[in-house]
Amino acid sequence: MRQWTQAAIIGMGALGMMYGERIAEKLGAEAVCFVADEERSRRYQQMDFAVNGRNRHFTIRNAKEMKPVDLVIVAVKGTGLSAALDGMAPCVGPETTIISVLNGISSEEIIGERFGREKVICCIAQGMDAVKFGGTLHYSRFGELRIGILAGNESGGEQGRRNLERLQALKDFLDRAEIPYVAEKDIRYRLWGKFMLNVGVNQTCMAYETNYGGALAAGEAYDTMTGAMKEVICLANAEGVALTEKDMEEYLELLKTLSPEGMPSMRQDGLARRLSEVELFSGTVRRLAARHGLKVPVNDRLYERICEMEREYNA
């Protein structure tokens, strides 16, 4: 198995910067670069960056100048995925592996349709409390990745062997970069669990203009968060994924380990008056619920409230 030597990160949000800094620190600046279009790469090159109070210099490259790399980490917002696919194309070759740390349950499928499903290893980023404003990133918990191959793709034939080789190469790279991870046997179950958490906490913090502590405090916000999560449990069951309220309780316990003053990405979007990933969360819940004939009133309310907030940005 050939050892990976270079990663490209698409997106300089909180997660992209967090992983880029760790890879550069542990494997060297030449091991990682951020890739963007010409206008954005020029803008990034003129910015100052800091992580947890320390100034950082990152390698930033124009997508047009890129050649295939070993690993592509997709760390854009859901609203930017379509454009990111075009920008990352020069980075992807026959042996390139791709992971996505986007929220939601659909990015791997979208990326796989463009570049080949065999190149994509499912990934979930969880347990971090990274917050980024401008070029400044702060976090107190680095969290971990959950990685795995979708059921049916992990064994059997030449492609199954190659899938396992890709997974092992990814594990080796993460080990050397000291990025914590857990290899999951049932990654689809984990994807839905993280989706359940995000549907609850991300949307609640935005709709109620609060942080993790506010969402966890007894009251309307907490009831909304757990109500939205319970609707995802019913939806997951209809999709053949055995989520339960015990899973919800475990994710709520995970949430309690984060800084109460911390906030998820959608709340950060709201503060910056940026369009959020509401379509990835309640938008997806509503579409799938309609397919199964399920009612999702909490997610309906969250969707309507967040869309109303975003319409007011330009009012």
Image (cartoon, rainbow, N blue to C red):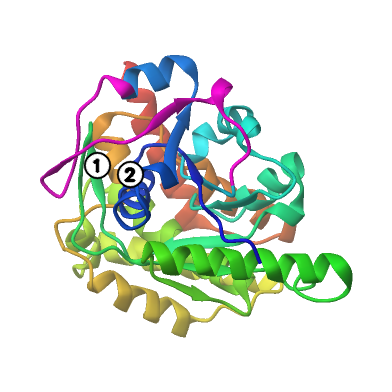
Mark 2 burial class by Cα count in 10 Å: few <14, some 14-19, many 20+: many
Helix, strand or loop status at disc 2: helix
Residue 231 in view (yes/no): no
257 relative to 74, above or below: below
| Amino acid type, callout 2 | Met
Mark 1 burial class by Cα count in 10 Å: few <14, some 14-19, many 20+: some
Of residues 8 and 278, the one nearer the viewer is 8
* Residue at the image point whose x is 63% and y is 60% from the top: 121
Asked if residue 61 lies in the magenta stretch, the reply is: yes
Dot 2 and dot 1 residues touching (CB under 8 Å) = yes
* Residue at the image point whose x is 55% and y is 23% from the top: 65
**Quarter in which the C terminus is drawn:** top left
In the rendered structure, the answer to whether residue 273 lies left or right of residue 156 reads left
> Magenta residues, as a range?
45-69
Q: Position of residue 223 (x, y in %)?
A: 32, 66
Q: Position of residue 151 (x, y in %)?
A: 74, 73
Of residues 218 and 203, the one nearer the viewer is 203
Viewer-nearest of discs 2 and 1: 2
Q: Position of residue 250 (x, y in %)?
A: 38, 81
| Amino acid type, callout 1 | Lys
Asked if residue 24 lies in the magenta stretch, the reply is: no
Quadrant housing residue 248? bottom left
Residue 230 in view (yes/no): yes
In the rendered image, which residue does mark 2 sit on? 17
In the rendered image, which residue does mark 1 sit on? 132
